[in-house]
Image: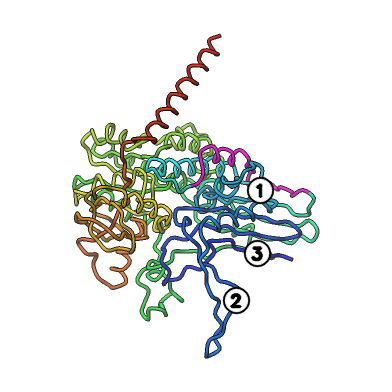
Amino acid sequence: MLRVTPLYGSSSHHPDQESIAIKPLSTLIEYDNRRILVDLGWDASCYNDVVVRTNNSTKDEVGSVSSPQKTVPLEEHLQKLREIVSTVDVIVLCDSTLLSIGGLPLLYTPDPSSSTSNSTKTPMIYATFPTTKMGQMTLYNTHSNASLDGQTHLNYTLDQIDDCISRITTVKYSQTVSLPNSDLSLTAHRSGIVVGGCFWMLKTSRDDTEIIISPGYHHLRERHLDPGTLSELGATPDVFITRPGGPGGLLQKLLDTTNSTTNSRMGRPALKTPIQRKETEGQFLDAIMSTLRRSGHVLIPTDASGRILELLLLLSAHWSRHRLATAYKLAWIAPLASTTLRFAKCQLEWMGEQLGEQFDSQRGHPLKLGNVMVCGSTREFVERVEGLGCPVCVLASGDCLDAGPSRDLLLRYAENPDNAVLLTDYLCAGMRSGVHLKNLQKEARKASHIHAGVTGDLGKGLDIDLVPPGLDVDLGNVDVVQSTSGIVLHPSRETTASQMMSAWCRAQIEGREMADVIEVDVLVPQRAPLEGEELRLFLKEEEDARLAARAGEERRAL
């Protein structure tokens, strides 16, 4: 018997739901006495208490059946998930994004509060080589952005990331892995979307039953990826397991139709319909160039190691074709940008055929990206790039605009309405971490004064120090412009990028132009000098590290 149990993230995307972005996913599959866990996704939106339905169904006066709900604290939810992970036989990862791999160091490792280090079973983990390396960069980037802000809600360390990554067994496309003491076998096939992304084919040698597990897939050829092979290899499976796709919330209301001409929910023709890739890229490049020509800067928030490669190839080719390097600069900022690019250059066999042909013809490495100035921090970017005095198009890690270089540049560019930000993926429009918001609330209560921030009444119930963004935002053909200064006492639960996208969606749904001014809030950490016991412990750790380093040097000298 086949049993499929969604652990989290499988809820259908509905126009009435809060989040636009799809949620990280994890699904338990039980078949032939084997327990297979597909993905351990996790992001900031998962750090919240969980609302679940109970089994105690009740009937109302008209006979309708309803299931009462209860709230499960986050720590209790995490503990239950860790217990489930400890009982599975195999974990398979589909790609290197947080939607697939973000919860690996949080749920796969033993509970930090446990007294025994071997309290968690260690099932086998299978993933492609790019998923392993690029996933490591994604987790490092997430940890780096949180650590620089002083966030403590991640609940895992860099050592835990390394431990998890070291336990992954890498496989190639079309390589079959047989599960021990079982008739089951697993095979990874190309799914597109990101380098190394795959769907899994589960087969039994006993009766040739074929089960396809594919949370996401892409059927088009791109600059750095060949199309997925799902239509060829997964055309007639016995069972096909996937997830509800597409955006939710206001964006779903804007795009969703029941047929090609009429949206029955809204009672009028669809407001937005899909357009060809070339047209999309043309609008994207036109928006960038129009901003640069008015001497403005363009900010493009991106992920750490996934879709960023497609954007880099697109923009680098455009800069070369039109010889823009002298007049305008193109930059990429991420804490591990250089390392990510170095790993990507070693993975041409996993990318599009055309990139391999370019490399084999000795026309240079397709990922050399001579037009892109790679920076590891905002400070390096300011010194190397902004100091040149040219308009800049910058791709910055931190796609939700709540942390990392993208947040820093958002605040830096806020005062100039000629600047623009382009949102290239609805996945950035998620929800904020409830744990982090609570931590900020505690810090705000301890503060002796409140700094300037943006005005607004987005959300309820928290007192948090914020700083004004105020900047021109291009979404499609619509501009979202500046915010004013003030203080947000009730910040939104949506990320900054989600607030921007929601404002654009509301304007489109209502059939009006975007307002000249919209209000969004940006979370900015409180940084205060160490004092008292914290300062004493920090100095002691620094001195211990210095003495240990000196002792090591002396041993090597001997």
Which residue carries the number 3 mark? 4
Q: If you read the primary sequence from the N terminus, does the residue marked by circle 1 or circle 2 appear first?
A: 2
Could you tell me residue 245's position as x and y percent? Answer: 50, 64
Q: Does the magenta stretch include residue 173?
A: yes
Q: Residue at x 39, y 71 (%)?
A: 253
**Secondary structure of residue under mark 3:** strand
Task: Judge from the rendering whether residue 69 lies leftward or rightward of residue 180; answer left or right.
Answer: left
Which three-letter amino acid code belongs to the residue tagged 1?
Answer: Ser
Q: Which residue is drawn at 51% across and 38% down?
A: 158
Which residue carries the number 1 mark? 174
Which residue carries the number 2 mark? 56
Pick the quarter of the image with the C terminus.
top right
- Nearer the viewer's eye, disc 3 or disc 1? 3
Could you tell me residue 341's position as x and y percent? Answer: 45, 36
Between the residue at mark 1 and the residue at mark 2, the CA separation in whole angstroms equals 46 Å
Between the residue at mark 3 and the residue at mark 2, the CA separation in whole angstroms equals 22 Å
Q: Give whichever of 349, 330 is nearer the camera.
A: 330
Which three-letter amino acid code belongs to the residue tagged 3?
Answer: Val
Q: What's drawn in magenta, residue-wise?
A: 155-180
Q: Give whichever of 356, 136 is nearer the camera.
A: 136
Could you tell me residue 376's position as x and y percent? Answer: 38, 35
- Nearer the viewer's eye, disc 3 or disc 2? 2
Q: Give whichever of 350, 323 is nearer the camera.
A: 350
Q: If you read the primary sequence from the N terminus, does the residue marked by circle 3 or circle 1 appear first?
A: 3
Task: Judge from the rendering whether residue 529 lies leftward or rightward of residue 312; answer left or right.
Answer: left
